[in-house]
Amino acid sequence: MVIVYRSNTGFTKEYAEMLGKAEKMKVCPLAEAQGKVGPGESVFFMGPLMAGHISGIDQAMKKFAVKGVCGVGMSPASQRTMDSMARANYVAGAPLFYLQGGWAPKKVGWLKRRMVNMVTKSTREALRSKGSRRSPEEEAQYQMLVKGGSFVAFENLEEIRAWLRGA
Ligand SMILES: Cc1cc2nc3c(=O)[nH]c(=O)nc-3n(C[C@H](O)[C@H](O)[C@H](O)COP(=O)(O)O)c2cc1C
């Protein structure tokens, strides 16, 4: 199995490379997969969430035998995040995973930055009004939404690694 990924601001790339190194798997960006990954080859696809949609998933599904999919977003991992991702990204017969990446406002164009800021406005305001009552997790999420930041961590890959070893 090959890890094929798409990444706009680098978080998914970091996860894909970490995972490839840990599991000794070939890693290839979707844009360079032509000629490097055979058609119909088994692929674990990783892509960033954009308005709920896993970017690149359609292209990957058309070209390869996608055996598993991972969406990388800015929200903390939760059942709610998983459920909404599963509703918007149906992948027949392949398990779906979620990883929290981060938010890099300086690496995206103004329009996308504005779109994200609009979507996260109510969360930011709710967290801001909590003030010093924010839990450490909420504080980290608040700082990331306001300034940008990364939640990429090797430990987050455990569930995917366990699945890959059994696949
Ligand atoms: C236009 C746009 C839409 C986004 N939509 C979502 C979303 O629906 N859910 C989410 O969790 N994150 C969303 N994000 C945040 C990215 O998914 C997040 O920053 C991710 O870690 C980016 O991965 P990358 O660095 O590999 O591109 C969005 C970001 C942009 C720029």
Image (spheres, rainbow, N blue to C red):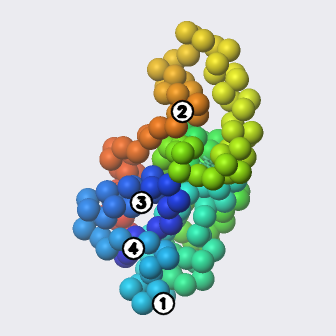
* As drawn, 72 above or below 27: above
- Residue of label 1: 39
* As drawn, 78 above or below 129: below
Dot 1, crowdedness within 10 Å: few (<14), some or many (≥20)? few
Quarter where residue 42 is shown: bottom left
Instruction: Find out if the beta carbon at label 3 lies less than 8 Å from the nearest ligand 1 atom.
Output: yes
Q: Nearer the viewer, mark 1 or mark 3?
A: 3
- Residue of label 2: 147
Q: Nearer the viewer, mark 4 or mark 2?
A: 2
Q: How far apart are the alpha carbons under marks 3 and 4?
A: 9 Å
Upstream in sequence: badge 1 or badge 2: 1
Residue at position x 34%, y 61% in the image: 17
- Residue of label 3: 13
Residue 166: tell me if it is visible. Answer: yes
Q: Nearer the viewer, mark 3 or mark 2?
A: 2
Q: How far apart are the alpha carbons under marks 1 and 4?
A: 14 Å
* As drawn, 35 above or below 59: below
Upstream in sequence: badge 3 or badge 4: 3
* As drawn, 13 above or below 41: above
Secondary element at image label 2: helix
Residue 15 screen position, x and y as percent: 39, 55
Residue at position x 64%, y 41% in the image: 80
Upstream in sequence: badge 1 or badge 3: 3
Q: Amino acid at mark 4?
A: Cys
Viewer-nearest residue: 50 or 10:
10
- Residue of label 4: 28
Viewer-nearest residue: 106 or 80:
106
Q: Amino acid at mark 1?
A: Pro
Residue 13 screen position, x and y as percent: 42, 60
Q: Amino acid at mark 2?
A: Lys
